[in-house]
Image (cartoon, coloured by chain):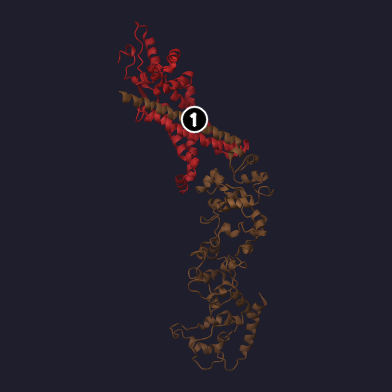
Chain colours: A red, B brown
Amino acid sequence: MDALTGRGLIRDDEVFLRMNRVERLQHILLIVSFSLLVVTGLPLMFYEMRLFKAVFSYGRVFYYRGVIHRAAAVLLIADIIWHFGYTILTRRGRENFRELMPRRKDALDAVALFGYNVGLSRWLTRKGLLRRFFDRHPFWKFENPPEYGRYNFIEKLEYLAVAWGSLVMIFSGFFMWNVELSLSMFPLWLHDIFAIAHGYEAMLAFLAIIIWHMYNVHLNPEVFPMSRIWLDGKITGHQLKTLHAIEYRKILAAREKALGPQPAEPGPDIPPGA
Amino acid sequence: MSRSGFVARFALPAALVFLAAAPLSGQPSDDDCLVCHGDSGLKGGQGQSLFVDGAKSAASIHGSAGISCVDCHSDLAKVSDFPHAGKLKPVACASCHEAAAAAVGQSAHGSAHSGPKPFAVLCKDCHGTHEIRASADASSRTFSLNIPETCTACHLSRVPNARGPGFVGQYLQSVHFRALSKAGLNSAATCVSCHGGHDVRLVDDSRSKVARPNIISTCGACHAGIERDYLEGVHGKAYVKGSRDVPVCTDCHAEHDIRSPADLGSIVYATKVAAVCSRCHDDESLARQYGLLTSRLKTYAASYHGMASKSGETRVANCASCHGHHDIRPSNDPRSSVNPANLAATCGTCHAGAGVNFSKGRIHVVSERTENRWAYTVKIVYLVVIGGLISVFLAFIAADLYRRLRGRWTR
């Protein structure tokens, strides 16, 4: 394989750090606080279910539910503040943030991945249908899966969703926690909207995590039963090459540059998807 | 005290004392009777005790008034040959206690009940016999603290009750009985306080003290301030007009099982109030008849107050916290606690510093569409976004799995 990875500058078994210790810890804090918040909060959206009624009316469970919910909220806020500081103050944080910003390419990537997975265009091409259209717009052929940088559109979407969700939840939750403060500023009907938004945003976040994130990091056959990146933060050169080809080439280019000009050699070969 | 009562209690005994002072020849004296009946081992033909405790009967209200044995056992007055015949006539209390006897005759006790083993209730069943004392006397069977024991002797199980067994016994858990038995408060309500004494009647008799039209004044006899509040409220006003649909005291507080609202078993315990009110306020036919707003319980249950209350939180608002209890008024009444002008104060009892913003919105929101359009918009947007995003996610996952599986099939 070394022959493929330009002058052997990146070996397949070389280990890269995808999540450093701080990032992993922030992620774990997010898991803990999010889970606690979901468990202690979301059942209120389904207050009519007999199970929740039975559990909540047992002893002082309902009271402690509230206490834990607010404690978890404080933990989440602390985690976000830490992440905020980390993003602003460290070079790696700033770099990650830049890489996480959505671009036009991400939307195209999403379309391309979907089109590639479905394979309709390839079938049409094989049958010789719509040839002129495909010749003029080769993008729609979806011959190869899209190539990603450090973060693919899925990861970017998740990051931005967490950012947006936290904003909504912390804002609305803060005013639900401090009813008197809220109502000293806002009319009751607006306060009611905070409560509604808090509940529905929670539903959205929960479903997004349980469906989208769980598939991408657990159930996806590529990583099943679980991607271990969140635990050890490690990614191999091979994984980098296949999953984050643009980032891979970037590292390769940087190393080549550091090594000085060499006789012409084929660039890194991009293996098609799977 | 009625005039006949006065005659029975004072004038008559006085006359008898006077007469006793000049003993009539031929009438057996109490001492004559006690020659035999003072023997604690004296038994009748069926083995029943014929013992009469001379000291107790002398200390009884009759004995201390100088009424002798034969004044009551009048068929022995003329007897001089002892021992006398076995069977005596029943004592006719009515010969002196005319008014009381007449009242009992009209009452539920005046006729045999409809149970499997009917029996008529006699004076002695409640008052006892030789040892009868004034009801103000702490050892009397009709003294307030002793009344429950006297009545429950029959009514706990012997007498069938239309409301089922155990209905009467519920009184023994009530706040009234606790006050009586634990606090020793002799002004606490006993059976007699609500049902009457001699003139006790069945609840479906309109003259009964516990009949619906009379219950407010019956409870109000002690709870005067609450009666006044109730009559000023929306329920009381309709009650005075003769409505039979408005709640009276017993509808919210139970009948025998009346407990303190702080008692977990009370039906007006903080977390159970909503269930009590919604019996009527979630009733479609009552709502139609009186133009009440429905879905009160449903909308309350959907609120944080409702959820927390349902889960046993007592500090959150229940119906009564905002609407009041005895003097509940319609919200258009300027004195109503839920009149928009008073909401800041009402909500402020829990939410300190609550301002006018509390009145800028609705509490029991039945339909966001008509009552809070922005909230409705937010809800719809969220539903669309959630539905849309989840569909996209699932589509991506399906496409991904499809490609992987197809790769496996064709390989």
Quarter of the figure with the C terminus of chain B: top left
Q: Is residue A4 left or right of residue B364?
A: left
Q: In the rendered view, tell whether residue A107 sits above or below residue B292.
A: above
Q: In the rendered view, tell whether residue A95 sits above or below residue B170.
A: above
The chain carrying label 1 is: B
Return the x and y of residue B350 as percentages of the image width and height: 59, 45
Q: Is residue B46 left or right of residue B303?
A: left
Return the x and y of residue A143 as percentages of the image width and height: 39, 17
Q: Is residue A26 visible?
A: no
Asked whether B58 or A140 is in front, the reply is: A140
Return the x and y of residue A140 as percentages of the image width and height: 44, 17
Q: Please give the residue where the numbered disc 1 appears in the rendered image.
A: B388
Q: In the rendered view, tell whether residue B249 sits above or below residue B186.
A: above
Q: In the rendered view, tell whether residue B176 sits above or below residue B96.
A: above
Q: Quadrant of residue B368?
A: top right
Return the x and y of residue A115 as percentages of the image width and height: 42, 22
Describe the element under mark 1 as helix, strand or loop: helix
Asked whether B332 or B20 is in front, the reply is: B332
Q: Quadrant of residue B77?
A: bottom right
Q: Quadrant of residue A257?
A: top left
